[in-house]
Amino acid sequence: MRLSRWRATVGRMCTKYDPQREAEAAMKRAAASEGADRQRLIQLALAWHELARERRDERAD
């Protein structure tokens, strides 16, 4: 399995993606993977989870 390159944007993101859903999907893919692919997918899931947490924090402010 090969990960596609994601373009990072600094500042407010206007996106149609649900970061929490993306994090969960990446963890499911990681569970089905092995070796280096598993590690990259776990890192991707953690990044999506961080975005989800930042969104929740912004809404709380």
Image: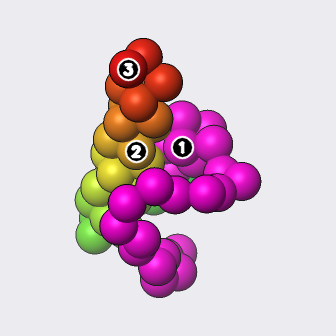
**Res. 47 in view:** yes
Closer-to-camera residue (39/5): 5
Which amino acid, by three-letter code, is at mark 3?
Asp
The residue lying toward the viewer, choosing from 47 and 30, is 47
- Which residue lies under the disc numbered 2? 51
Numbered range of the magenta stretch: 1-28
In the rendered structure, does residue 4 fall within the stretch colored magenta?
Answer: yes
31 sits left or right of 35 in the view: right
Comparing 36 with 7, the one in front is 7
Q: Which residue is labeled 3 in the image?
A: 61
Query: What residue type is disc 2 on?
Result: Leu
- Are circles 2 and 1 on residues that touch, CB within 8 Å? yes
* Amino acid at the residue labelled 1: Pro
Of badges 3 and 2, nearer the viewer stands: 3
Tell me, yes or no, if residue 45 can be seen here.
no
Residue 60 percent location from the top left of the image: 42, 17
Above or below for 49 versus 7: above
Q: Give the image location of residue 32, x and y in percent.
A: 52, 51
Dot 2: element: helix
Upstream in sequence: badge 3 or badge 2: 2
Which residue is label 1 attached to?
19
Mark 3 and mark 1: span between their CA atoms? 19 Å
Q: Earlier in the sequence, mark 3 or mark 1?
A: 1
Instruction: Provide the major secondary structure of the magenta segment.
Output: loop
